Image (cartoon, grey):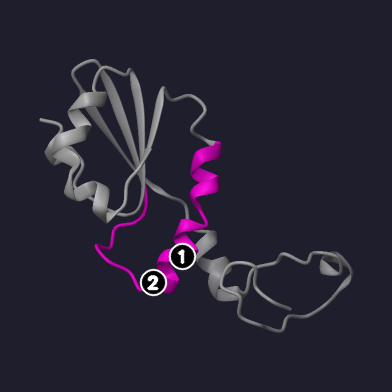
Amino acid sequence: MQCPVCGRTYVFELDFSNLFSKDKPCPSCQKILDQQYLEETIPVSRGVIAYRYFTDQSSLAYEVYQIYAYQFAKALDMAISHDLIIIVESHEYSTIEAWLPLFFGFGSILIISVIWFDIARHTG
């Protein structure tokens, strides 16, 4: 079977419960996909920023980064109650001081990233 996340071919025990499940991730991807996101709540002048990230490491190998990025769908499913959703990667974080204060007028902001960035440092 081929993993839909990483594309590697792997073997698993076939039984009636998984006979028709074509999109089953390989065991190494499934281990990463089963992890829950981490969350920080950052108060700002007129609301709150919910910051969700998948790992507290500051850098990842490209393949592992892609597996975590696959998890964005899970985080976005839970984002319905927010006024604004921002996805941040390294490039956006390098310019955060220019654009983040523009969004403080929104009541509830959700910021999502794969790796941890020090978002709270830029809200003061």
The answer to whether the residues at label 1 and label 2 have Cβ atoms under 8 Å apart is yes
SS at badge 1: helix
SS at badge 2: helix
Q: To which residue does mark 2 refer?
A: 62
> Residue at image x 19%, y 47%?
118
Q: Quadrant of the C terminus?
A: top left
Residue 62 drawn in magenta = yes
Image position, residue 54 (x, y; %): 39, 54
Badge 2 amino acid: Tyr
> Residue at image x 43%, y 70%?
64
For label 2, count other residues whose C-alpha is less than 10 Å away and answer few (under 14), some (14-19) or many (20+).
Answer: few
Residue 102 picture quarter:
top left
Image position, residue 3 (x, y; %): 65, 73
**Which of the pair 36/63 is nearer the observer?**
63
Residue 61 drawn in magenta = yes
Q: Which residues are magenta?
A: 53-77
Location of residue 20 with respect to 91 vertically, above or below? below
In the displayed structure, does residue 109 sit left or right of residue 36?
Answer: left
Image position, residue 35 (x, y; %): 48, 58
As drawn, which residue projects farthest toward the right? 16
Location of residue 30 with respect to 13 vertically, above or below? above
> Residue at image x 22%, y 48%?
93
Q: To which residue does mark 1 refer?
A: 66
**Which of the pair 36/111 is nearer the observer?**
111
As drawn, which residue projects farthest toward the left? 124
Badge 1 amino acid: Gln
In the displayed structure, does residue 109 sit left or right of residue 117?
Answer: right
Cα distance, mark 1 to mark 2?
Answer: 6 Å
In the displayed structure, does residue 84 sit left or right of residue 43?
Answer: right
Query: Which labelled disc corresponds to residue 28?
Result: none
Location of residue 45 with respect to 12 vertically, above or below? above
Image position, residue 77 (x, y; %): 56, 38
